[in-house]
Amino acid sequence: MSTVRLVGITKHYGATVAVQDFNLQVADGELVTLLGPSGCGKTTTLRTVAGLVEPSAGRIWFDDQDVTDLPPRKRNIGFVFQTPALFPHLSVANNIAFGLSVKGAKKDAIGARVDEMLTMVGLAGYGSRLPAQLSGGQQQRVSLARVLATDPRVLLFDEPLSALDRNLRDTLKYSILDLQRRTRKTAIYVTHDQSEAFAISDRIVVMNAGRAEQIGTQTDIYLHPQTPFVAEFIGANNGLTGTVTGTDGAGDEARMVVAADGLTLRARPRPDVRAGDQVLVYLRPENLVVLPDGDGAEYDNVVDGTIDRVIFEGPTAQLRVDVAGRELRADISGSQRLTLIQRQGKVRLGFNDLTMIPAGAALTSAGSESASAAIANAAPGGTEP
Amino acid sequence: MTAMTLHRPRLKARRLTDVLSHGYIWFCLVLFVLPFVALLTQSLGERGGTSGIDNYADVFGSFGDNLLWSFKISGLALLVDLAVCLPAAYALVRYPVPGKRVIFSLLQLPLYVPGAVIGLSLLMTYTFVYPIEFMWGLVLAMSVGSFPLMLTPIVVALKDLPLVFEEAAECLGATKWQAYRKIVFPLIGPGVSAGLLLCFIIVFNEYLVTLFVHPPEVTTAPLRIFNLVRTAGLLPTTAALAVTMQLISFAAVLLFFRVFGTRYLKGTYLI
């Protein structure tokens, strides 16, 4: 049971900046995921929390204790690595007992705890085996048991599923979530896999180039990306650049008019955007609807285009539509996708929800703003507005 | 029918290659074993009416002391080697030591320097710089000459050992020393034992450096053989001592393969 607070964490390797002014507060019992492409600094950040990497600047707090200068063994953490990292010369039971035995626990207590942990991860009776005699998934479950045996304050996961095959990943990610919920441990989880992050997180930190781009729940990040990077990295998106030309309508119906790449689009107003501003506009492919000819009055935006290509993906059909010389992607689901497979020629698309981001919303301002906002608002469970 | 006649010459050619290659292997084996057989025959030779087996009584009689010295010097030299090489290898592999490659190459130097040169330089060192009493001068000389053979396999084993095991141990609450003792050391065991074996074989059979630096009261078995052959020619008893030394070295190699070979060397040409 512990909160974790990272304040201004920075890590340089020579001239290379791995992490830049990273701020995060993790509430007690919360599972926060650091999500980003490889090389974005997420693993380095996690390793500073573990004490395996010394930050160049910044402090790390567990509750009211500043742990920045403590070695890993004094932090009482559980670190699950990308590989199971089971000690190959020790039996499964001795692997799980390792943490307790180096801390000088009594033999009887260790034995009982090992059995309890093996049962917890569903491997009772495997104690006497050597790690090499287990499958990859079983090994990673043992490494979970080994970490939980010492009753750590904080659980840290460094892409624990990336070395496993797809089916195993799907089952094991829910096992991890289940164990974290049952033990009510505070956890930080690093992954580059969006579906993994979306499945298990209370909150997600999207990282890019050593910085936190946005911190929020799955819906925050997916529906209201704050920076171009988040809009483009999370899910698929059609990105356009444009200029705000004015406002249309009033009250709830008010829309900003954007001239973007030869199209005139209407988006919900943002207080930080005015007429004349450069903006980036993003349309999610699943929000684009194929309309019958001549229809479309209920949509803010209606565009006409020509179908370039239809890609049938099973649950969805992907439409590549040429609209005013640029390609838009529309993902069509339901029975409509089947009627579209053979379709060619002209098509009319309608959509309401589009995301408008000021062109100046670069990494720095948006990242640290949302980060500090997240710290101010951090609440147990991590469900902030 | 035609097919068979066509194939015949090819089969014959293959058979001939088989015979030749097997013959070559046996020729090499005999070549390697021949000196040992010669020595064995000599060691069983009769002298003055006693049977050949009696020659071996001397090995544990008048030569017993020499064998004991050999074991003592080898054992101590191995301990010194271990004490130097375990931390040195760890530092070379795990820490950013400046000029790492140069240092490692320099440390290999004793392997390339002739024994007589090492012996002479150590003799001068002991005589003029650091007078070392009793057998320790010899022990240190053996360590200096053999430690690269200990260092290299340990460095290789450590390089092959992912850092993640130590990190996992430390995150679980182990001190650096506990992580080393309980995790790293057992996992580099094959490297350490390879080093022990190589050093033992070299030190146990060494006589040239010993010739220069041995104190009068210490005569190792190889040195005794050398002295006896020089003064009295190859007596059957001397040959018996030599055969015993060969058997001991052989036993060490067999023991190594028996304990570690099956686990770690399977699939290599060694087994």
Image (cartoon, rainbow, N blue to C red):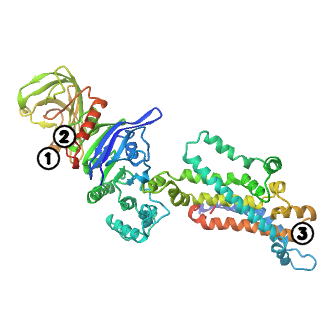
Q: Where the C terminus of chain B falls, by quadrant?
A: bottom right
Q: How crowded is mark 3: few (under 14 residues within 10 Å), some or many (20 or more)?
A: some
First reached walking from the N terminus: tag 1 or tag 2: 2
**Residue in the foreground of this view, choosing between B95 and A126:** B95
The amino acid type found where label 1 is placed reads: Ser
Residue A265: x %, y % from top left: 15, 27
**Residue in the foreground of this view, choosing between B27 and A248:** A248
Residue A324: x %, y % from top left: 20, 25
**Residue in the foreground of this view, choosing between A99 and A218:** A99
- In the drawing, what numbered circle is on residue A286? 2
Distance of mark 1 from mark 3, alpha carbons?
101 Å
Residue A165 against residue A300 in the figure, above or below: below
Frontmost of labels 1 and 2 is 2
At x 70%, y 68%, the residue is B251
The amino acid type found where label 2 is placed reads: Glu
Q: Which chain carries label 2?
A: A
Residue A61 against residue B10 in the figure, above or below: above
Residue B248 against residue A222 in the figure, above or below: below
Distance of mark 2 from mark 3, alpha carbons?
97 Å
Q: How crowded is mark 2: few (under 14 residues within 10 Å), some or many (20 or more)?
A: some
Q: What element carries label 2?
A: helix
At x 19%, y 39%, the residue is A223
Q: Is mark 3 on a helix, strand or loop?
A: loop
Whether residue B259 is visible here, answered yes or no, is yes
- In the drawing, what numbered circle is on residue B235? 3
Q: Where the N terminus of chain B falls, by quadrant?
A: bottom right
- A70 sits to left or right of A249: right
Q: Mark 1 points at which residue?
A: A335
Residue B18: x %, y % from top left: 68, 61
